[in-house]
């Protein structure tokens, strides 16, 4: 059933044009307590109302719902260790600067990597000079190698922004690398791994990378083109040689919004997952010791343990912790609650002691001129209203 205060609040934010639609779900001890769908999942090219089963581009929730969960499964089996060095798996990181980067560094965003790079631009450049940091590799060999190897090479070539273990800097690059590592260890593409290890065991029917076209009208639409990323590239000084081929100019609907993930054929460790609120809830339950069926209960400690004490942000394995200053959990959630956000306007927070799960899915990038609205205050108020009613 819906909660009137939550629904009224979110409807007011729809009317304020923060986002055109919202679907929320609040659960406790494995049971859904509140849920509702509001607004328009698609405004243009036609109007389609949001429903409880609307499929959303979850964006960076992929990092926890797929990549983080799969890493935890391997850690539990002893096939991956937090102390493992990425250079032990990919030799391009065996350099004096990057040799000590561990799996834990990638999972907690303490690797020192920059937050983002537009690989869809960098991969289209052809230069006569040696590739910085990859001088031993010929330019021809580099551009003739598989896309995954080329992306790893570009990440390896980039100078770290901070020393390893010195600061939390949220970075897509960490989870792109973890996605490659999972593929190496499982010897399968990431979407096939997720299907076998997560989607099939949980009997998920509306969760996937690259949603099928027949579900397009049940999928929330996103931005018209990639104007946000294009502007970001310009601001950061990247050369855009052919905007028409390097950036989409159509309504992004039924395909991933993130430019790098789209370039990687819709499958990556950092983005690309689509799902409904109810199926997101089914995966979220796997992070709770009392409810998980994919992990051993003790493995769930990974998600509520602070591995970055003394640094600028509290991070566990894959998640941010609510004790982080100004986290979107709000003060309503316990400090060991853990959660994650998605750029498209999605949010997941889990409070382990009460076994409460809070999911808010919006499509804030759709039918709106730039800049997009920062909806962190909306996320906090959503949690506050939900907890007030649950008490």
Image (cartoon, rainbow, N blue to C red):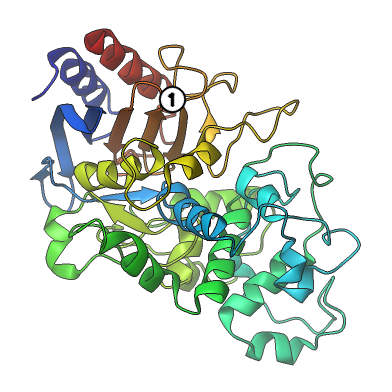
Depth check, front residue: 385 or 132:
385
Per the image, label 1 sits on a secondary structure element best described as: helix
- Tell me the quarter of the picture where residue 49 sits: top left
Is residue 90 visible in this depiction of the protein? yes
Q: Relative to residue 382, is residue 165 depicted above or below?
A: below
Number of marks drawn: 1
Residue 358 is left or right of residue 328, and the answer is left
Depth check, front residue: 220 or 4:
4
- Tell me the quarter of the picture where residue 256 sits: bottom left
Q: Which residue is mark 1?
A: 376
- Image point (31%, 20%), residue name: 382
- Image point (28%, 28%), residue name: 17
Task: Indicate the quadrant containing the N terminus: top left, top right, bottom left or bottom right.
Answer: top left
Task: Indicate the quadrant containing the C terminus: top left, top right, bottom left or bottom right.
Answer: top left
Depth check, front residue: 153 or 288:
288
Q: Relative to residue 64, is residue 78 depicted above or below?
A: below
Percent position of residue 214, x then y: 12, 68
Q: Residues within 10 Å of mark 1 (few under 14, many from 20)?
A: some
- Image point (31%, 47%), residue name: 283
Percent position of residue 365, x then y: 35, 43
């Amino acid at each position: 059933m819906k909660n009137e205060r939550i629904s009224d609040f979110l409807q007011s934010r729809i009317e304020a044009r923060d986002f055109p639609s919202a679907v929320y779900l609040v659960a406790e001890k494995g049971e859904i307590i509140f849920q509702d769908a509001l607004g328009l999942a698609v405004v243009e090219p036609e109007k389609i109302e949001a429903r409880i089963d609307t499929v959303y581009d979850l964006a960076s929730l992929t990092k926890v719902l797929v990549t983080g969960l799969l890493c935890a499964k391997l850690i539990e089996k002893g096939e991956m260790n937090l102390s493992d060095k990425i250079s032990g798996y990919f030799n391009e990181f065996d350099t004096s600067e990057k040799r000590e980067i561990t799996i834990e560094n990638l999972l907690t965003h303490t690797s020192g990597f920059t937050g983002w790079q537009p690989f869809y631009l960098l991969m289209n450049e052809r230069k006569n000079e040696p590739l910085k940091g990859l001088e031993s590799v010929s330019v021809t060999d580099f551009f003739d190698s598989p896309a995954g190897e080329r992306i790893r090479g570009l990440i390896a070539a980039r100078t770290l922004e901070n020393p390893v273990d010195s600061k939390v800097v949220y970075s897509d690059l960490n989870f792109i690398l973890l996605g490659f590592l999972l593929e190496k260890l499982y010897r399968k593409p990431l979407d096939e791994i997720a299907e076998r290890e997560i989607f099939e065991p949980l009997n998920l029917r509306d969760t996937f990378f690259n949603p099928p076209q027949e579900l397009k009208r049940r999928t929330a639409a996103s931005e018209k083109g990639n104007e946000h990323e294009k502007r970001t590239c310009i601001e950061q000084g990247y050369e855009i040689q052919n905007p028409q081929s390097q950036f989409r100019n159509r309504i992004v609907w039924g395909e991933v919004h993130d430019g790098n993930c789209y370039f990687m054929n819709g499958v990556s460790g950092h983005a690309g997952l689509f799902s409904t609120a109810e199926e997101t809830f089914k995966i979220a339950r796997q992070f709770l010791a009392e409810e998980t069926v994919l992990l051993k209960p003790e493995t769930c400690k990974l998600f509520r343990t602070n591995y970055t004490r003394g640094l600028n942000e509290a991070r566990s394995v894959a998640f941010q912790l609510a004790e982080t200053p100004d986290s979107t959990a709000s003060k309503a959630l316990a400090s060991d609650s853990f959660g994650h956000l998605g750029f498209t306007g999605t949010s997941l927070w889990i409070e382990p002691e009460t076994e409460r799960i809070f999911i808010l899915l919006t499509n804030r990038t759709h039918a709106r001129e730039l800049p997009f609205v920062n909806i962190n205050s909306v996320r906090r108020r959503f949690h506050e209203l939900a907890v007030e009613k649950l008490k």
